[in-house]
Amino acid sequence: MMKLLPLLMLSVLLTGCIGDKSDLELFVTTTKAQHVAHIPPLKETPKFEHFAYQADLMRSPYVPPSRELTEEVIDTTKDCLQPDLKRRKGRLETYALDNLRMRGTLSERDDIWALLETTDGSVYRLGVGQYLGLYHGKIAKVTPQTVEIIELIPDGSGCWTERNSSMELTGE
């Protein structure tokens, strides 16, 4: 008898769900008749225009660019201030001056060198006459507090002008 009781209760509950659904069907049909969805028409598809890609006229992306595209092309025919193109560039000439910090000095007798730190944490010792920065910067003077630099800036007409820059000792 105990096993039949749950089965009997389940059958009673299921018979209650089979009742009259005419009111529900009437509601669905009236709602569908009153509310018509407005769907805007699709835009006309654009006309296809063929483009002939001619890669033979362009540089391949898998070949390094030529020297003229990546390095400064300097007109040496003019009789004006020019950087020394035959000089081999140093490691610190790949950094902008903003990316270098003066961290201290070293001295021996009359010689004084600046200790400059790069963004990757490397520290270099530089003295008067050495180069740094992107614009052919040459160290003109080193004091215990500053490094004075003379940079060569292109003027747009093929000549170069000197610009004085400096770095101060930072304790950060």
Image (cartoon, rainbow, N blue to C red):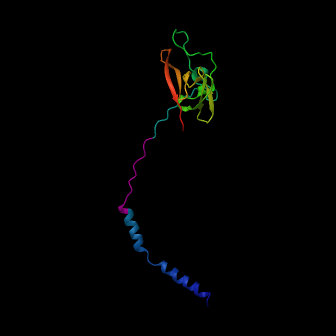
Task: Please say whether residue 101 is one of the residues in the magenta stretch.
Answer: no
Residue 156, horizontal then vertical, whole percent: 48, 17
- Which residue is drawn at the image coordinates 39% and 56% (left, top)? 37
Q: In front here: 104 or 4?
A: 104
Residue 84, horizontal then vertical, whole percent: 59, 15
Instruction: Give left or right: position of 118 versus 45.
Output: right
Q: Main secondary structure of the magenta part?
A: loop
- Which residue is drawn at the image coordinates 62% and 17% (left, top)? 87
Residue 121, horizontal then vertical, whole percent: 61, 36
Q: Is residue 104 visible?
A: yes
Q: In front here: 113 or 2?
A: 113
Q: In front here: 77 or 49?
A: 77
Quarter of the picture containing the N terminus is bottom right
- Figure check: 44 above or below 129: below
Instruction: Give left or right: position of 1 versus 50.
Output: right
Quarter of the picture containing the C terminus is top right
Q: Is residue 51 visible?
A: no
Task: Look at the image and give the residue range highlighted in magenta.
Answer: 33-44
- Which residue is drawn at the image coordinates 60% and 27% (left, top)? 92
Q: In front here: 52 or 2?
A: 2
Residue 130, horizontal then vertical, whole percent: 60, 22
- Quarter of image, res 125: top right
What residue occupies the far front of the structure in this picture? 109
What residue occupies the far bottom of the structure in this picture? 1
Task: Please say whether residue 42 is one of the residues in the magenta stretch.
Answer: yes
